[in-house]
Amino acid sequence: MRALNGLEPFAHRCRVYYEDTDAGGVVYYVNYLKFMERARTERLRHLGFSQSQLAQGNLLFVVHSSEARYHAPARLDDELRVTAQVLELNRASLRFVQQVWREKDETLLCEGQFLVAAVRADTFKPRAIPPELRDAFVADCSGNQSNAGE
């Protein structure tokens, strides 16, 4: 299933804290990956699924591969909008395209793609994404994806 359909992607809002920055007050590059991880987690929560609930059902999502491009720095106290749009939904994986934007001036700071695999919590072997979760992603991709979380 391809989901890039022109709709506004799911977005999670967060703020840059001192702990996110380096000595120069600029967000340390790896923290963009953390912001994007949080947006993917909040996307699941928006669909009605928590990570702990999925783990109890013997399902974990693990990052198989990631790619990030950095365009401009975020700084202390910036408010960020982090999108998490499903590009591809497969039997046992999801491909997300994500962007991090600075809210005050609508500047794209970082963007990337992430292949996230579904695995069994007990063995870490691949497993199919449960039908109810697949259905929730399909319904969300064909409806309005806009959301703001804190």
Image (cartoon, rainbow, N blue to C red):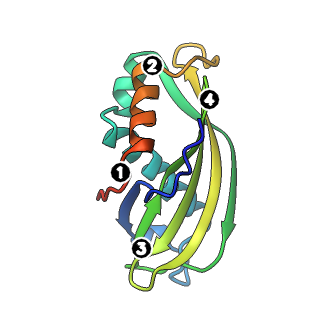
| Residue 23 pos. (x, y %) | 55, 80
Sooner in the amino-acid sequence: mark 4 or mark 1: 4
Q: Residues within 10 Å of mark 4 (few under 14, many from 20)?
A: some
Q: Residue at x 50, y 26 (%)?
A: 60
Which residue matches tag 4? 90
117 relative to 106, above or below:
above
Residue nearest the observer in this picture, 9 or 65? 9
Which three-letter amino acid code belongs to the residue tagged 3?
Tyr
Give the distance between the C-alpha atoms of the residues marked 3 and 4, in whole angstroms: 38 Å
Sooner in the amino-acid sequence: mark 3 or mark 4: 3
Q: Nearer the viewer, mark 3 or mark 4?
A: 4
Which three-letter amino acid code belongs to the residue tagged 2?
Pro
Which three-letter amino acid code belongs to the residue tagged 1?
Asn
Question: Of helix, strand and loop, which one carries label 2?
Answer: helix
Give the distance between the C-alpha atoms of the residues marked 3 and 2, in whole angstroms: 41 Å
Q: Nearer the viewer, mark 4 or mark 1?
A: 1
Which residue matches tag 3? 18
| Residue 13 pos. (x, y %) | 36, 63
Q: Say whether residue 55 is visible.
A: yes
Q: Say whether residue 16 is visible.
A: no
Which residue matches tag 1? 144
Q: Residues within 10 Å of mark 3 (few under 14, many from 20)?
A: some
Residue nearest the observer in this picture, 140 or 61? 140
Q: Residues within 10 Å of mark 2 (few under 14, many from 20)?
A: few
> Is 117 positioned to the left or the right of 83 in the image?
right
Which residue matches tag 2? 131
Question: Of helix, strand and loop, which one carries label 4?
Answer: loop
Q: Nearer the viewer, mark 3 or mark 2?
A: 2
Give the distance between the C-alpha atoms of the residues marked 1 and 2, in whole angstroms: 21 Å
Disc ID at residue 123: none
Give the distance between the C-alpha atoms of the residues marked 4 and 1, in whole angstroms: 21 Å
Residue nearest the observer in this picture, 137 or 12? 137
